[in-house]
Image (cartoon, rainbow, N blue to C red):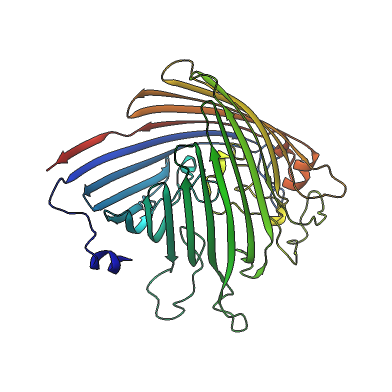
Amino acid sequence: MLLLMAATGCWAQTDSLNQLSIGLNFLTHGEMCGGGLPRSDDGSVSTEDRSSFLFGRTRLIVDYERPGLQAHAVIQNKAVWGMQGNQSVGLYEGWVKMTARNGLFAQLGRVALAYDDERIIGTNDFATAAKSHDVVRVGYEGHGHKAHVILAYNQNGENVYDGTYYDNGAQYYKTMQTVWYHYDVPHFPLGASLLFMNIGQQSGKPQEVNNQPSTEYQQMYGGYFNFHPKYLTLEGSYYRQTGDLVDAVMMQCKPVKAWMASAKATINPSDRYGFELGYDYLSGDDYVPMLYGGRFGTPRHEVEKGFSPLYGSRTKFYGIMDYFYESAYINGFTPGLQNAFIGIFGKPTGKLNCSATYHYLAVATDLNDLDRTLGHSIDLQASYQFSKDISFSAGYTQMMGTETMDRLKQGSSSKRARWAWFSLVVSPTIFKTKW
């Protein structure tokens, strides 16, 4: 595509306005947690697990733009307050983007990707570390159509030996190819997207002669729609996973057949308040009975049926505590999830936003001697915009778990988990010029 665009002379002219801006982004985040952690192997962790910490993230953001060319770089440091050393400084984003007059573009570098409602690919910025990908992205945008092709190939270093082996990194895949298409219907409040991903993961261990490394591929495909007339927004999505999934611990693969579906309605009768309700279903593995209070090995399934949200913004969908896809169940069991929720949100003043959401949570798998219900949670959140570059937000989550939650998480503290947090974001632009 680059050669085609250059050959046809369709790059935008570069003899006009240049823009440069430099900004800073300071995030201070604090958490107080009570409960919710699985029991340790030796029982040394108390059943009422508690923790509290302060986290700081600083970003230096540089943007350059002229017709036909954009460049963007974000240097990031993140650390818990009091952490020794400064080992967490790195490049969060760094890319260049070339755009043609006819809507074609090419972008390459480290990019924070976000698509549709961010359920499958998102920045997950609430997690403070956030997500970015080293990719080449080419595509077209214009006349209501958006078509993107994303290509990635990851390595641990400039290896001469074992040069094809990849076992860790910012994103846990070796290769990735993604095609995304979105269409907005003209003069009608409807948009729809289609997504296909082919993800190659490393299998095998290079140091074992009889277990040679190989790349195993899984596929994700599905779609999303958004219908938004004046006072109502309807959203829905459906995705399937097929192919082979690599066990990150055992470095072995097995077939995966999983799926998920979601539906959500948001009602805005006024600019001052609104309501939302919805339902998510994520498929789960077949149940393997587990001893309460102890482990007896990792359950093995011939087919992996537990759906993975992959690189999505998980706290956005399944409760702000992120209790089910970041905090693992015992033995790596993935029972799936049903999430029925209803919430209310409002703007008491022009700068204050508040929301309250109730979640009914259950597994998607038959559990023989246990009920499917995991419990109930309530999320309370508020944010205040002091100025265009200073904002404060805070929240509290109460989890009221069941015996099923206790058994699957292997700890009674899971039944009464509590989490309070706050975030202060200051993001000034310190320099901006045009010439």
231 over 208 or under it: above or below: above
Residue lying furthest right: 369
Residue 133 versus residue 237 in the image, above or below: below
Q: Residue at x 50, y 45 (%)?
A: 116
Q: Where does the image place residue 190, in percent across and percent down from the top left?
A: 51, 40
Which residue is depicted at the point 73% across and 43% down? Answer: 411
Q: Looking at the rendering, in which quadrant would you find the N terminus?
A: bottom left
- As drawn, is 20 to the left or to the right of 242? left
Q: In this view of the protein, which residue sits in the foreground, 397 or 280?
A: 280
Residue pictured at 62% horizontal, 40% vertical: 318
Res 397 visible: yes
Q: Quadrant of residue 417?
A: top right
The residue most toward the bottom is 209
Image quarter of the C terminus = top left
Q: Position of residue 66 (x, y in %)?
A: 20, 49
Residue toward you, 32 or 138: 138
Nearer-the-camera pick, 139 or 89: 139
Left or right, 318 with reference to 187: right
Name the residue rendered at 62%, 83% in the picture. 210
Relative to 212, residue 61 above or below = above
Residue 70 position (above or below residue 169): above
Specify whether residue 399 is in view: no
Q: Position of residue 362 (x, y in %)?
A: 74, 41
Residue 104 position within the rendered picture, expressed as x and y whole percent measured from the top left: 33, 57
Report the label total.
0
Q: Is residue 176 left or right of residue 103?
A: right
In the image, farthest residue toward the top: 349
